[in-house]
Structure formats: C-alpha cells, structure tokens
Image: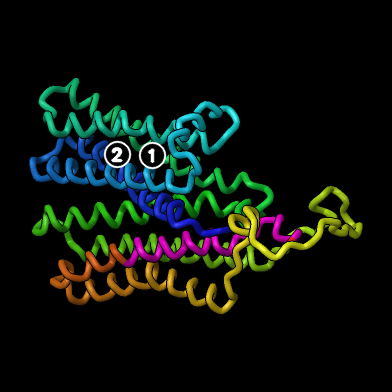
Amino acid sequence: MHPALSVIFFTTLSGAGYGLLVWLGVSVMMLQSRGGMASPLVSLQLIATGLALVLVTIGLLCSLGHLGKPQRAWRAMSQWRTSWLSREGVLSLLTYLPALAMLWLLWRGVRTPDAAALLVVVAILTTLLALATISCTAMIYASLKPIPAWTHPLVLPGYLLFALHGGAALLFLLMLWKLPGDIAAAGLSKILAVLGVLAGLLKLLYWRETDRGTLPTRGAAVGLPGREVEVFERPHTQANYLTREMVFVVAREHAQALRWLALALFAGVPLLAALVLSLWPKVGGLLFPLTVVAILAGTFVERWLFFAQARHMVSQYY
C-alpha cells in the first residue's frame, strides 16, 4: 500500500493524543478518589488536556489530506452501523465533549462534591471514548480482507499499545516540567522502557508472522482455488490509480533496516534512558525530552512500514 504521509501523521499524532487522554482520565479518577488535586496537579492536567486535544485535532486534520474532496468528509459518518471509518469519525468527535468538559471543570476548579463527582464521570467517559476511537482506527485496517497483513490479530493491540506508549511519554515529560522536584525521572523512564519493550516484542512477532504469510493465488483471489487464471487485458506502460495507491514496493534490505531503526527508537532509546537515569538521575531534564522525541519518531517509522509493506491482493494482477 502507498504510505501516504497524511495518514501516517494522522495515526501517529492522534494516537499519541488519544493515548494521553486515556492516561489523563485515569489519573483524574485516581486523584479524585484520594480527595482531590493540589494546585500544581491541576495546572499539569490543564496543560496535558489541552496538548492532547491539539494533537488529536492536528491528526484529524491531517487525515483529510488524503481525501479527494475533504469537504465531503462529514458524509462518511452516516454509515456508522457498518463502517469502522464512520465509527471512528463519530467517536473522535464525541470524545471532544467529555474532554472539553474535563478541561472546563479543571479550569473552573472543583469546589463541591457534585463537581468532583461530575469530574470523575467525564474522566471515565474521556478514557473509554479515547480507547474506543483508537480501536476503531485499528479496525479500519484490520477489517480489510484484501490486505492479509492487516487482518493479523496483533494489529488492534499494536495500535492500542503504541497510543498508550506515546501518551505516557508526553504525560511524563509534562510531569517532569511542571513538577521537577516531586517526580523521579528514573521511575518514569522505567515505565516507558517496559512499554517500549512490549511494543518491540509485539512488532517482532507481527513481522515474523506476516513475513511467513503469502498472498493467495490469482485463482483463489477470483474464487477459483486450484485453477490457473490468465489475464486477458492488454499490458500498459503507465501507472494507474491501483498501482499508485495499492502497489508499493520497498526493498527487503531497506525494510529490514527501517525495522531495526524503529525498534531502536521506540524501544532501545527508552531502555537505554532508563539505565542511564538509574545511574545518573540528574540528567533527566536533558535525556527525557530526547526519549520522548525518539518514541514518537519510532512510532512514525513503524507506521510507515505498516503501510509500505502491506501487500494488497490486487498486486497479484500486476
């Protein structure tokens, strides 16, 4: 499949934004269960919620860049009963409601038990809707049977794990910035390292399984398994829509190098950072931002490979 940058930016940025909303919802619930938040924590939650909404908005706007007529994007939301793309669009907009409500309550201040209860409710809704939106994004691809690599059962947990990894990285970076004296960078880096290792193991298993898989024969693709099928159409020398959008070739050695690069960025760098910070905690202010950038860059490379290495069955025709 053609790795359109608009879609890659969309899945990377919106994934990190929704992942950040998930962690924010959970943290607000936990802090309210302990009796409320101190002023520095409220400021942190406000900034983090605003950042998450900005990332989500930028990601959604990027997704419009791949449409032939972006002004008609709203029409896709009418098919939510059968289309994962439509469900994603509906849920992505619905997520704004509790997220903005949470932002407003944090800014206004929680002064009464009723306001505290309402904050917990909108935090729960924000977490659930963000998780549902990420899941719908993954299912857009996992439901496409003509692309065998995308129907693998690890696609959905992979999207969720990468979103949570990016969201946690952004939240921890804000925590170190807003609460430098109260947060241990070494402990936070270990959480990112664990998430990165889990994501790395998942991708290694996914790549091994998809590399072993083969596309169906031309006969099976047209419903005639075990039979020889020949093409009657005359060959052409110029690219068409199918070859531009659904047939993309990346050299095996280049793909392998990009895989190792992605693993080094989203798994290796957090692991190395956790080791360094456990020995020299004072360098957290310099090392942690680099770790967050590496995680997001590694996710971007992984997303590019996810599209570039996916082989549509129409490639059998060409």
Q: Which mark is residue 25?
A: 2
Task: State whether residue 261 is above or below residue 184.
Answer: below
Task: State whether residue 291 is above or below residue 123.
Answer: below
Provide the secondary structure element on which disc 1 rests: helix
The percent coordinates of residue 211 (x first, y second) are 64, 68
The percent coordinates of residue 214 (x first, y second) are 72, 64
Q: Nearer the viewer, mark 1 or mark 2?
A: 1
Q: State if disc 2 and disc 1 touch (CB < 8 Å).
A: yes
Instruction: Find the residue positioned furthest to the bottom.
Output: 253
Residue corresponding to mark 1: 130
Q: Amino acid at mark 1?
A: Ala
Mark 1, Cα crowd under 10 Å, few <14 / some 14-19 / many 20+, is: many
Q: Amino acid at mark 2?
A: Gly
The percent coordinates of residue 154 (x first, y second) are 56, 54
Q: Residue at x 49, y 77 (%)?
A: 257
Q: Residue at x 38, y 30 (%)?
A: 94
Mark 2, Cα crowd under 10 Å, few <14 / some 14-19 / many 20+, is: many
Residue 316 on the magenta segment: yes
* First to last magenta residue range: 294-317
Left or right: where 172 falls relative to 65: left
Instruction: Find the residue positioned furthest to the top.
Output: 114
The percent coordinates of residue 47 (x first, y second) are 18, 45
Q: Residue at x 13, y 71 (%)?
A: 282
Task: State whether residue 274 is above or below residue 111.
Answer: below
Name which quarter of the figure residue 187 lies in: bottom left
